[in-house]
Image (spheres, rainbow, N blue to C red):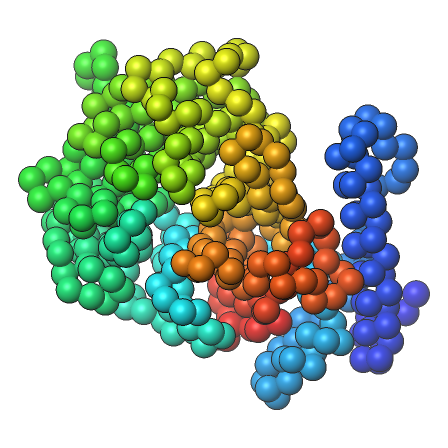
């Protein structure tokens, strides 16, 4: 095999496409077999992508295509893939978070973890704009199109993106704390603030710590938590909070506990309500895997589900995913996991489709008409998908029927965002 630096563009293209096609075919066949028969029944070799040696040349060609405004041609010649470029991602990746739909083909999102310096962006079609440098978090309400923007000193809520200001909350107790997630209430008069130093319910009168709680009044107690996660029901009647060390707790709109759901894997990791608020799903994880269960919302007041115990109080939605992010559609959930898959499940736990993107999925948002999905990863990749449009190429991994319009490579220490 020639070194990649000695190959012509035509030779690189031929090898990239042939090996990419074979890899996608092998993965799809393996996954389809194991879903039907179980992993223990698979006796074949695990699929392996043999294109890592082409990574530097592919990125070089991609950058040239961007500079020469020939991305469309490059995309046809070199269908994108994640696996061969892992060595590049390891050096340049910056995670993407807090994706929110604005209107038409416009979204807002942030790069960087809560403890890192962050950058906020607007993506409109394929045009990207950087927002004010002091923005540390952005949130959107479950209903009514209320946005929240945080800086180190305050949080503002508005009626629509860049709309009339509803409330401004001075951050005192929570000042300068990195924000994992920010969820404004539907009226813009309260916000749920999720951080590794506790989960807070913020209003004009208080910054109320609602999770964890110092129940034993310990003198040296701190609210520091890991795997912090929370959600609001769409009608804002319920708050759900959890972390690595404690069960998911069901709270009322004022922050009072009314129920408890124990993990069915090791650690509580994610939670989400169905769009019609009839079901709550909670995910718990163990390494890269996990279990997601569904609970009827009609049972939340007073519910107590024990950890690691089978119960008629819940149904199993999935038994494999460590879920990092998700959205609710009118008919199903779309969940993103640690292995780089997005998968759709209905409320009975039937998997409707799976689609592989790569990296650990870190954020997503869906257009109001539920036709366009934007997905971000810890690899610094942003994918724009048109759901149900059909496959764009034969390199697609998964059994879904989605069309990737483009992906953006948003990396640290890069002067430009690269489109593929």
Looking at the image, is 293 positioned above or below residue 64? above
Q: Residue furthest left?
A: 205
In front of the other: 227 or 239: 239
Task: Residue at 53% x, 53% y: name it.
Answer: 377
Residue 71 appears left or right of 149: right
Quarter the C terminus occupies: bottom right
* Residue 352 shown left or right of residue 416 in the figure: right
118, 301: nearer the viewer: 301
For residue 405, above or below residue 216:
below
Residue shown at 40%/64% (left/top)? 107
Circle count: 0
**In x, y percent, where is residue 327?**
46, 46
Residue 300 in picture, x, y percent from top left: 34, 22
Q: Nearer the viewer, residue 400 or 271?
A: 400
Quarter of the rendering occupied by the N terminus: bottom right
In this view, 48 is above or below 211: below
Q: Nearer the viewer, residue 328 or 364?
A: 328
Seen from this angle, which residue lies furthest right? 1
Q: Quadrant of residue 248?
A: top left
Residue 285 found in image quarter: top right
Location of residue 122 by image quarter = bottom left
Give the residue displayed 12% in from the left and 49% down from the top.
170
Residue 123 visible at all: no
> Could you say where residue 62 lies in the image, as x and y percent from the top left?
66, 76
Residue 59 in view in this figure: yes
- In this rendering, position of residue 289 left or right of residue 366: right
Please state the horizontal and vertical placement of residue 229, each as a whole percent of the image. 38, 35
Residue at image coords 13%, 56%: 166
């Amino acid at each position: 095999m020639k070194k990649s630096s000695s190959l012509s563009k035509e030779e690189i293209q031929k090898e990239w496409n042939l090996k990419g096609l074979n890899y996608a075919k092998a993965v799809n066949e393996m996954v389809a077999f194991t879903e039907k028969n179980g992993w223990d029944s698979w006796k074949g070799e695990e699929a392996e992508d043999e294109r890592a040696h082409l990574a530097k040349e592919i990125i070089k060609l991609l950058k040239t295509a961007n500079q020469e405004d020939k991305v469309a041609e490059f995309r046809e010649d070199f269908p994108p893939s994640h696996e061969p470029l892992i060595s590049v991602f390891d050096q340049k990746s910056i995670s993407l978070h807090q994706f929110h739909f604005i209107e038409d083909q416009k979204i807002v999102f942030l790069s960087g973890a809560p403890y890192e310096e962050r950058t906020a962006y607007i993506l409109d079609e394929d045009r990207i704009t950087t927002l004010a440098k002091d923005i540390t978090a952005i949130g959107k309400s479950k209903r009514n199109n209320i946005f929240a923007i945080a800086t180190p000193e305050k949080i503002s809520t508005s009626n629509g993106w860049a709309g009339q200001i509803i409330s401004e909350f001075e951050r005192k107790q929570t000042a300068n704390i990195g924000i994992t997630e920010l969820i404004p209430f539907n009226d813009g008069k309260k916000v749920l603030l999720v951080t590794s130093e506790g989960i807070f319910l913020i209003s004009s009168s208080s910054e109320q710590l609602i999770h964890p709680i110092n129940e034993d009044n310990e003198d040296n107690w701190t609210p520091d938590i890991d795997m912090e996660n929370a959600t609001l029901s769409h009608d804002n009647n319920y708050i759900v909070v959890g972390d690595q060390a404690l069960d998911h707790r069901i709270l009322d709109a004022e922050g009072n506990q009314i129920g408890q759901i124990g993990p069915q894997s090791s650690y509580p990791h994610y939670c989400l309500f169905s769009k019609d608020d009839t079901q709550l799903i909670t995910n718990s994880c163990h390494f890269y895997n996990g279990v997601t269960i569904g609970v009827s919302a009609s049972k939340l007041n007073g519910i107590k589900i024990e950890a690691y115990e089978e119960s008629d109080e819940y149904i199993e939605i999935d038994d494999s995913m460590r879920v990092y992010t998700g959205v609710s559609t009118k008919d199903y959930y779309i969940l993103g996991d640690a292995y780089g898959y997005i998968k759709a499940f209905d409320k009975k736990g039937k998997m409707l489709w799976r689609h592989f993107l790569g990296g650990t999925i870190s954020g997503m948002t869906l257009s109001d008409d539920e036709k366009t999905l934007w997905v971000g990863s810890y690899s610094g990749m942003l994918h724009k998908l048109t759901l149900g449009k059909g496959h764009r190429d034969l390199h697609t991994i998964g059994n879904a029927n989605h069309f990737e319009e483009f992906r953006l490579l948003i990396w640290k220490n890069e002067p430009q965002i690269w489109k593929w």
